Amino acid sequence: MILTLYRLATSIGAPLISVYLKKRLRRGKEDATRFNERLGKPSTPRPEGALVWMHGASIGESLSMLPVIAEIVSRANAPTVLVTTGTVTSARLMRERLPEGALHQFVPVDRIPYVEGFLDHWRPDVALWWESELWPNLVTETHHRKIPMILVNARMSPPSFLRWQRWSSLARALLGCFKIVLAQSDNDVERFRTLGAADVARMGNMKFAVPALPCDEATLAEIRSRTGLRPMWLAASTHAGEEEIVWQVHQKIQNAHPHLLSILVPRHPDRGVEIAEMLRQQGAVVAVRSNSEPVTPETNIYLADTLGELGLFFRLSPIVFMGKSLVPAGGQNTIEPARLGAAIIIGPHYWNFDDITKSMAAAGGLKIVADADALADAVAMDLSQPAQAQARAHAAYDYVETESKVLELFMDRITPFLDAAEGTHHARP
């Protein structure tokens, strides 16, 4: 019943959906040159042979796809890998990092005509859906075409679980379309089973298989030459409300560390202008990276409002606070800074990465703080006691290394589906 109502709503709501998409286009949230892909009109021909379709929402999911994509395209008689995501930033990342044998398209908006156009063109042989973005029309139309689907790296946060329980019949209908659900943690397994998934297995988190974030070594050397031996800390992937806290922390500890440099990387770089203005009004001396403003001895905060450079700043700063965790937004991935030797600090809101956070903390690999004052105390302690911070960084790195075998386990589970796709595929008209 709910699925029928959803289909009806996306049909009769076509004019409103069109207005919404045009608004996103004007705001730069859609790629004007590839906008037709969102309408189910692909911009490139379908390659010959078998095709594996992978879908994820945005940057985090697409990054965790990369090791799997590399494994698939290295197979003998490898199928083509089609990656779909929904954001401009993830499309840019895929353009830079997809290997030969893989291509990217924007996922169609979840209206039946758009979905049918997408599936008619690409005709995937197997579909791997990443984490938890379940578009009802896209899921059910794929299932109706008897395309095997696997939900990969599946996670279900407590807030999402409560929401899906209110729509339990829809959850059962969608999860019933998947052959297997490969979940990140035991808690995720239990939640997916409760919502109606039939075959659920704990696989671990594919983010552990992602290589360390890349970095331009020349740029790193250039920034190090400007920052010298200044004490520094990094606030990464911050969200609204956390940038003010970064400045409060800086002010609280700068007397003990008068040459302190605070590096701020907002999760959404398009907020850079707004953040810089707010910080300057509060008295901070800010250098904005997107404006090529250099770090000087007077700079308090280096605002890195750019894309794809977290690997650079994780290497630059030995102390990393991961954002989206001092505000009730669910936290961010701590595996990335752990791989690069950072002493990690997070706030109390980390439910999106609950299993990883608790396990890493139990291994001595990160520090959880309650509020802005506690964050200031933690940063000050790490600056004053670098050996203690380094020990925490080593523990985080060791924990990540022990979990990195997830890729091998995952490939064992999906290989039968890849073999079937390659073995039964025939030349297409």
Image (tube, rainbow, N blue to C red):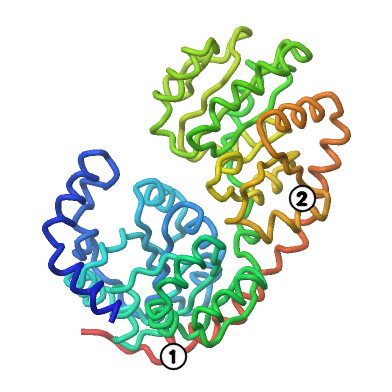
Rendered position, 195 above or below 11: below
- Identity of the amino acid at label 1? Gly
Which is more foreground, mark 2 or mark 1?
2
Location of the C terminus (image quadrant): bottom left
Residue, disc 2? 397
Labels in figure, total: 2
Left-right relation of 101 to 138 = right
Image quarter in which the N terminus is found: bottom left
Dot 2, how many residues are within 10 Å of its Cα: few (below 14), some (14-19), or many (20+)?
many
Residue at the spot 54% in from the left edge and 28% down from the top edge: 243
Does the CB distance between marks 2 and 1 fall below 8 Å? no
Q: Report the front residue among 83 and 197.
A: 197
Residue 297 in the image: above or below residue 313:
above
Q: Position of residue 65 (x, y in %)?
A: 51, 62
Which element carries disc 1, helix, strand or loop? helix
Q: Tell me the residue at 72%/27% (across/down).
A: 376
